[in-house]
Structures are given as structure tokens and as C-alpha cells.
Amino acid sequence: MKVYLQLAALLLVVTVILATEAEKPTEAEKPTGAEKPTGAEKPPPKKGKDGKAKEGPCNTKKKKVVEKKCPGKDCDDPCEIVKGPRKKVCYGNMLLSKTQKENLKRIEKILQLNATDSTYLVTYMEKSGKRQGYTALLWAAEKNNTVMMEMLLNASSRVNHQSSSGISALFLVARNGNKECVEMLLQRGAKPDLKTKSGYTPLIIAVWNRFSDIVKILLDNKADPNTTTPNSHYSALYLAARNGDLDIVKYLTQAKAFLNPVTSWDVTPLHVATYWGHEEIVELLLNSGADPNIQEKDGYTMLHKAVYYNYPGIVDLALGAKVQVDTQSKNGYTALIQAVRSGRLKMVEKIVKAKPNPNLQERTGKTALHWAARSQGVEVVQALLKTCPNAKLEDMDGRTPLDTAKAPQHSRSRKNTSRLRGQPQLLAG
């Protein structure tokens, strides 16, 4: 019985499926585009659970569009919608940003919008990073933008504000070589001697970068000509002498800069000018009263350096300035010993004319004659003999100049042996 019932149910299902398929239109019976129902024949919109018609393609209502006052980052003034104290902060950050980008129109507009409270705005600072403490004026100075600086100064920017590292606007424009901005800041009351935390002043940085016009402007505005760098203690005059900047050296000497300041190694402007062979600067310093007899830490004077580096013109200037020709360095070298060791005949002859003491011994006991007998030519020995040296003096090894000349390792000096033997007056003591 159960089997008959299952077969009857299955037959009923098959009958229903066949009836459904028969009701579907064939491909030929489907309506064409022209036969599609018109708008009037479209079925009514479906209703939702609440009985209201759902929105569809033919049942839409216009929504009210609420326009934001400031639509995102393209907004003309994103700070306009900010309320309370944060509004000032917003404008402060915007001013810093636009100054970095040198956007003059936006800077002008920001300043106009905040004309009644511009003091807060122009003193707003960077809160972090390498430029911590920078105001808009410092950014304008770093960008070397004269127009921006003038706009910000007219808005009551603090001309002597310093960043967290002590950098001022005057320092930045002096470093950049902007003469117009230097003058503008000084006219607005900028202090010419403000130091960075590392100890540098606008004058030092201008001399360092060889901006002679700016150096003159700063000195004319009472900048201290004797300021020095930290650690090494380089003075402005030292830096100018080293760089060979004759005009800057003139400006500094006219401003009564100290002529003999020493660095941490006791090196003076005269020493460094001699080292680099700046003959005109050496002459100017000597004529201004610089001391040619100061010794650096190793005991060398400017004459030692001029002889060693072969600057005959500077040697003449030193000798003309009454330099002490017999000054010995820490290793005992005199200018004469230096000249003989170099083997430069003309240099030896110049020193010999100054009537040096030929018997001074360096730390190993050698005299100039020892050095001449050891390795130099006959001409150098002949020039040296004019000073009547004592040929009996022994070095620390007990050798006289004649012994030195005989030594086999000094083959170049064998010709000097006969020259020394032919000078009996040398052996007289």
C-alpha cells in the first residue's frame, strides 16, 4: 500500500513540473523592444513592510545636499571651521607650512585674516624636529626670501627670536649671503652678536663663507670683531687670513680687531697666512703691528714656516719686520737649520745675511753645519761657512760635522769633507 502512495506522489510532482514548463513563452513568443510595456504600463512600485513605496528608478526623491563649509584638503581656508583656541593653532601651523612652501598669496591672506592678532601668529613655532623653535620669519630667512621676510616683519615678527639651537634670522641671512636682508634686519633692531648654541655669530659665519660686503655691514653696525669659534678658538681675523680674503682682513684691522689672537694650538693670523702663502695679507698684518715672534705650540714662528714652505717673499717681510732669526722650536730648529735641511741655496743665503748664530744645536745636538755636511751640496756648505761656524761641536753621538761628512751612508756629502778640511779657521773653536 505504501508503495502505491509513493508512486502517486511522484506522479503528482512530475505533472506539476510539466504544467509549469508549458506556461513559459517560447523564443518566438517573447516580446520585442516595440512590444515592451510603456511607462504607463509599468507595474506599481513594491511596498515595504511599513506600507510605503520603496525607492526605485521611477520613484526617487531629491535629497537635500548639505554643503560643508570646508570640503577637505582642497579647502580654501581649513581653519575657518575650527572653533576656540585651536583656531589660532591652526593658523599658526598653516603659516609655517605656507612659509616653507614660499606661498606668498596664502601668507598674505593668513596675515590679513589675523590682522588683529598677528603677534601670536608670527611667534608660533615649530614644536619638534631639526627646526624646532623656528618661526615663520626663520623659515623665510632660511629660504632666503626677501619679500616673505618683509611681510612677516611688517606683521610684528620678533626680529631677535632664536630657535632651540640658538639660530637667529640674522645668522641665517648672513650665512646665505643676502645683503638686502641683513640690512633690513639690522634696521629693524637685529642684534649683530647673537650666538648660536654652538657659539657661532653672524660675523663668524659671514667671514667663513667669504661674504666681504656682509662683513663690512656687520662691522659698521658694531659687531664684535674679536668673537671666536668654540673649541678651536678661531677668530674672524684668523679665518679671513686663512682664506686669503684681503678685503675682509682690511675691514677687521680697521675695526680694531686683535692682531695676535691665538687658536687652541697657539696659531695666530700671521702664522696661518704664512702657511698658505698669502703674502699680501702677511704684509698687511705686519704693517698693522702683528707680532712676528709669537711661537705656536710646537715652537715655530712665522719665519720657520716661511722657510719650511719656501716663501722667499714672506721671509723678506719677516726679516724686514725684525723677526728674531735665532728662535728655536721645541725640537731645537732655527730658521737657519730649517733652510739648510731643505737644501734651498737661496733660502740659506737669505738667512745668512741676517747674521744668525750658526752654532745653535737642535735636540740631537746637530748644528746647521752638521746638516749641511750630512746631505747637502757644496754650495750650501760654502754659504754656511760665511757665518764662521764651530766645526768642533759634537752631536749626541759624539760626531763633529767632519765626522758626519765622512760617514759612508752620507755619500752625497763626501765632497764636503775636503771643503771642511780646507777651512782651518773652523777648527779654532
Image: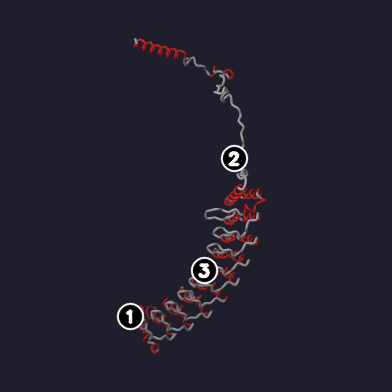
Residue 236 figure quarter: bottom right
According to the picture, the residue beneath numbered tag 3 turns out to be: 233
Residue type at mark 2: give it: Pro
Residue 316 pos. (x, y %):
51, 78
Q: Residue furthest front?
A: 1
Whether residue 20 can be seen here = yes
Q: Earlier in the sequence, mark 3 or mark 2?
A: 2
Residue 153 pos. (x, y %):
64, 56
Residue 19 versus residue 279 in the image, above or below: above
- Residue at image position (43%, 13%) is 16
Disc 1 is placed on an element classified as: loop
- Circle 3 crowding by C-alpha within 10 Å: few under 14, some 14–19, many from 20: some
Q: Residue furthest left?
A: 408
Q: Earlier in the sequence, mark 3 or mark 1?
A: 3
Q: Earlier in the sequence, mark 1 or mark 2?
A: 2
Q: Is residue 256 left or right of residue 272?
A: right
Q: Which mark is residue 416?
A: none
Q: Which mark is residue 71?
A: 2
Q: Nearer the viewer, mark 1 or mark 2?
A: 2
Q: Is residue 306 left or right of residue 5?
A: right
- Residue at image position (67%, 51%) is 116
Mark 3 and mark 2: Cα distance apart in space: 57 Å
Please name whichever residue, 211 or 97, is drawn nearer the observer in this view of the structure: 97
Residue 207 pos. (x, y %):
56, 65
Disc 2 is placed on an element classified as: loop
- Circle 1 crowding by C-alpha within 10 Å: few under 14, some 14–19, many from 20: some
Residue 420 versus residue 30 in the image, above or below: below
Q: Which mark is residue 407?
A: 1
